[in-house]
């Protein structure tokens, strides 16, 4: 339940519609409505993932790269080579990712980092921490504290359903876990970042609640191993790799900036593009706009209805024109969604050729997409049904983790 809207929502310095603008809360495409990811990489100062790095991941993990890597969905990084160097030398690292629980269920865009994180956990056999920022959503969305805590647990069930290994995974909610070593790191980070910097990095203004100004340190602190004494003791030499979409980059630019001043290691990142809204590339799929999103608790009928009604089509006005010119794959949302979730490379390539040449029609591509998404969502629902409250408690328990300790020896 939203109690009130923060007064500064309209005051944030988001540039005119024609300018691309991305931060953790706003995704706005440029003049043509699309997101220029090359420009974003330049603006943010991260690096592009190149084929040599992907080949190195395959070599080191002795398994094929995840389709999200092969298809350029995870496309940018910071210091990934250094993490691979560690792995090669047997030096431990851990994974850190998270979710801001603002809706009852995850949407398909949220599944992207979690599915990818599951692959990374399996491929590298490393510990993982998952932060549920119920505090962030309470501050930004005006969510009642009790409701934010409830959503955190509900979202944890969707996350667990992605298949994480409980012996190596710690899920925590800020409302429950802030304190002790975690809070000590938060305060040390808060001592290093000025109002001016927060304004510059996150577009916050003097009208914003002070909670917003203080919060970035809460998302930064899990990048440091000694935030988790039950997993790493007081060690500061365990590096952290953060898989996320590129909207979260500002938090970790800030973290990387303060890390050396605190005697901590800079976290590395591996970052994805956005799974677009049904209406098109200009925005990311957002939980606050239900017509833009397909949720993991949608029924097959919901999925069919949303795809048929809202998925922006690159097909032409008339069948004749479509047969002559082919679909515009650059803007076609169904095609983009298939690139995320249709696993069969050959089938995907076939659809690309046939649809692009006008031999396949939008209706046929949408029917294929409905099948792919319905299968994905119903598999997820089956997995989620077995996640009991006791299972959630097991993932969220602050406990010594034997498997982790063994990996750190
Ligand atoms: P949240 O809840 O907005 O998003 C959760 C994760 O999903 C990614 N994401 C998307 N990826 C692809 N396509 C989309 N349309 C899309 N929408 C969201 C986000 O980048 C994120 O990885 N503040 C964070 C929670 C958080 C976190 C973290 C995220 C805390 N610590 C560490 C990543 C890493 C949030 O509100 O995420």
Image (cartoon, grey):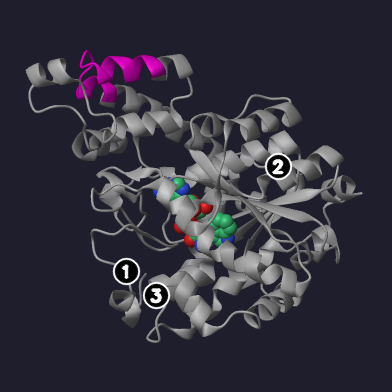
At numbered mark 3, what does the secondary structure look like: helix, strand or loop?
A: loop
Residue that numbered label 2 is attached to? 165
- Which of the 4 image quadrants contains residue 237? bottom right
Viewer-side residue, 303 vs 10: 10
* Label 1 CB sits under 8 Å from any ligand 1 atom: no
Residue 14: mark = 1
Quick check: marks 2 and 1 in contact, CB under 8 Å?
no
At numbered mark 1, what does the secondary structure look like: helix, strand or loop?
A: loop
Q: Position of residue 118 (x, y in %)?
A: 63, 40
* Crowd around label 1: few <14 · some 14–19 · many ≥20 (10 Å): some
**Is 162 located above or below residue 174 in the figure?**
above
Viewer-side residue, 147 vs 112: 112
Residue 354 relative to residue 42: left or right: left
Q: Position of residue 205 (x, y in %)?
A: 39, 81
Where the N terminus falls, by quadrant? bottom left
* Crowd around label 2: few <14 · some 14–19 · many ≥20 (10 Å): some
Quick check: marks 3 and 1 in contact, CB under 8 Å?
no
- Which of the 4 image quadrants contains residue 261? bottom right
Marks 3 and 1, how far apart at CA: 20 Å
**Residue drawn at x 68%, y 28% as measured from the top left:** 58
Nearest to N terminus: mark 2 or mark 1:
1
**Farthest right residue in view:** 409
């Amino acid at each position: 339940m939203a109690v009130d809207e923060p007064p500064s929502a309209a005051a944030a310095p988001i540039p005119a519609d024609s300018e691309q603008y991305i931060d953790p809360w706003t995704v706005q495409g440029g003049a043509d409505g699309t997101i220029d990811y090359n420009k974003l990489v330049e603006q943010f100062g991260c690096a592009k993932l190149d084929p040599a790095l992907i080949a190195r991941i395959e070599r080191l993990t002795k398994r094929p790269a995840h389709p999200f890597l092969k298809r350029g969905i995870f496309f940018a990084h910071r210091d990934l080579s250094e993490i691979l160097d560690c792995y090669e030398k047997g030096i431990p690292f851990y994974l850190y990712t998270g979710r801001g629980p603002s809706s009852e269920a995850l949407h398909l865009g949220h599944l992207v980092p979690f599915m990818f994180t599951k692959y990374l956990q399996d491929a590298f056999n490393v510990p993982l921490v998952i932060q549920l920022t119920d505090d962030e959503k309470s501050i930004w969305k005006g969510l009642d504290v009790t409701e934010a805590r409830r959503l955190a647990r509900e979202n944890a069930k969707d996350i667990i359903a992605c298949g994480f290994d409980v012996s190596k995974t710690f899920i925590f909610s800020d409302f429950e876990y802030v304190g002790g070593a975690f809070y000590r790191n938060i305060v040390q980070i808060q001592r290093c970042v000025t109002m001016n910097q927060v304004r510059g990095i996150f577009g916050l203004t003097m009208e914003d609640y002070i909670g917003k100004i203080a919060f970035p340190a809460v998302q930064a602190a899990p990048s440091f191993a000694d935030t988790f004494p039950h997993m790493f003791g007081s060690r500061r030499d365990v590096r952290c790799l953060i898989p996320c979409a590129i909207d979260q980059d500002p938090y970790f630019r800030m973290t990387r900036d303060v890390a050396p001043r605190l005697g901590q290691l800079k976290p590395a990142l591996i970052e994805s593009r956005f799974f677009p809204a049904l209406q098109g590339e200009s925005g990311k799929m957002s939980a606050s706009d239900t017509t833009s999103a397909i949720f993991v608790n949608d029924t097959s009928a919901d999925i069919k209805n949303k795809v048929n009604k809202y998925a922006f089509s690159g097909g032409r006005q008339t069948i004749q024109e479509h047969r002559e010119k082919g679909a515009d794959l650059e803007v076609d949302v169904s095609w983009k969604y298939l690139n995320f979730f249709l696993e069969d490379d050959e089938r995907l390539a076939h659809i690309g050729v046939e649809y692009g040449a006008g031999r396949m029609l939008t209706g046929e591509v949408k029917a294929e997409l409905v099948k792919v998404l319905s299968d994905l969502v119903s598999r997820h629902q089956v997995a989620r049904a077995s996640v009991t409250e006791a299972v959630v408690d097991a993932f969220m328990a602050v406990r010594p983790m034997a498997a982790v300790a063994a990996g750190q020896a």
